[in-house]
Image (cartoon, rainbow, N blue to C red):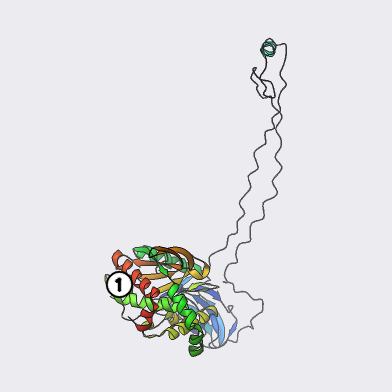
Amino acid sequence: MKDLVVPSLGESITEAVIGKWLVEVGGRVDADEPVVDLETDKITVQMPSPVSGALLEQKYSVGDTVRVGDIIGQVDENAKGAEPKASAVSSTSAAKPAPAAEPASEPVAAATAPAIAAPVLPERDATGRILSPSQRKDIRGGKAKLPAVSVAVAAPRAHEPTVEEVVPMSPLRRRIAERLVQAQQSSASLTTFNEVDMSAIIEMRKLYKEDFLETHGVKLGFMSFAVKAAVEGLKLFPGLNAEVRDAAIVYKKNYDLGIAVGTEKGLVVPVLRDCDRRGFADVEQGIISMATKARTNKLVLDDLVGGTFTITNGGIYGSMMSTPLLNFPQTGILGLHNIVKRAMVVGDHVEVRPMMYLALTYDHRVVDGKEAVQFLVAVKQRMENPQRLMFGV
């Protein structure tokens, strides 16, 4: 018998969730063949069998939380095991989403209430015209009657039940939710804003984009300017390149920036290492490589751990402004947004400029408001004067 033991899942990751059993109990498995999906808040890892044989036991069900070192199953290396069935479903496979509720039936047409006589003041007839003195006298004496006016009163509409679809959270989504709540509860987060005139960067890209592509084989994008500007800002304000560990502040001396990437499974944050040592082309190539791995599910845990600061770009989805959440346990995250032409006062004139909002969420336990504002100003100044980034001043 060989135990299936949850392996080390990377820095600071101590537990995972059983996402899916890939082999049924009694099913044949080859050595190094994936047996189960382990989901963390960062990535899904396929755990292989240590030997060939048959899966003897699944100690945990889909959705259960397991820790590094836990024994989650056993493989009998002396058994051949059954051939996998094309339509086989593990007894512990994930619960299917609940079917959508049946649509509400068509409401019954409201019935019309019987006509009722509307009270009419003797001074007016049924059409509202003022009666003459003689007409009013006849009515009061009972010699004439006013015609009743029919008023249709609609019955109340029948209550229409809400149509709902209840879909259980995936284990990965639950873990992400737990980590986001942890980040909110374990830090004193606050967000400050500024705006950047992107004219100079746009002009520089127009001038050099073809030469840059020909020389380096990669396009010159906006993100490399943001990465380089953030690194310079972090050097000035190291509290944003840190984390709180127990009762101490740990200042990081490396600049490994997490770059948020959207995938079909959700947002992941692969880490671009040594950003302070990279040139613009190296930053662009690194970002493209990480995004490609993320969208083709080829990221490994080492790609996702050890980040010291994070940049997220909601502008690619059209976001004008947002308050990004800290990537716990980091103390800072920079949010970029879409570039919009707006009327700006330049000197004594109003000019149309391409503007972008910046948002910095920071941990107030480590970083004061003054430092946060000054960091954003430093980023703004360098992005509005990209020559400073090129020359490192």
Kindly give the residue lying farthest to the front in the view shown: 348
Q: Which is more toward the observer, 51 or 384?
A: 384
Name the residue that disc number 1 marks. Answer: 239
From the viewer's perspective, tell me whether residue 196 is left or right of residue 87. left
Q: Which amino acid type is shown beneath numbered disc 1?
A: Gly
Q: Could you tell me which secondary element the residue under label 1 belongs to?
A: helix
Residue 308 seen: no
Residue 14 seen: yes
Q: Which is more toward the observer, 29 or 82?
A: 29
Residue 176 image offset from top left, x and y in percent: 46, 68
Kindly give the residue lying farthest to the top in the view shown: 141
Q: Which is more toward the observer, 365 or 357?
A: 357
Image point (47%, 83%), residue name = 208
From the viewer's perspective, tell me whether residue 209 is left or right of residue 363. right
Number of on-image labels: 1
Image point (45%, 67%), residue name = 355
Residue 352 image offset from top left, x and y in percent: 47, 66
Residue 123 image offset from top left, x and y in percent: 64, 17
Q: Is residue 113 above or below residue 381?
A: above
Packing grade of label 1 (10 A; few <14, some 14-19, many >=20) is many
Q: Is residue 208 above or below residue 262?
A: below
Image point (46%, 74%), residue name = 260
From the viewer's perspective, tell me whether residue 201 is left or right of residue 57. left
Q: Which is more toward the observer, 371 or 299?
A: 371
Q: Is residue 41 above or below residue 166?
A: below
Q: Quadrant of the C terminus?
A: bottom left
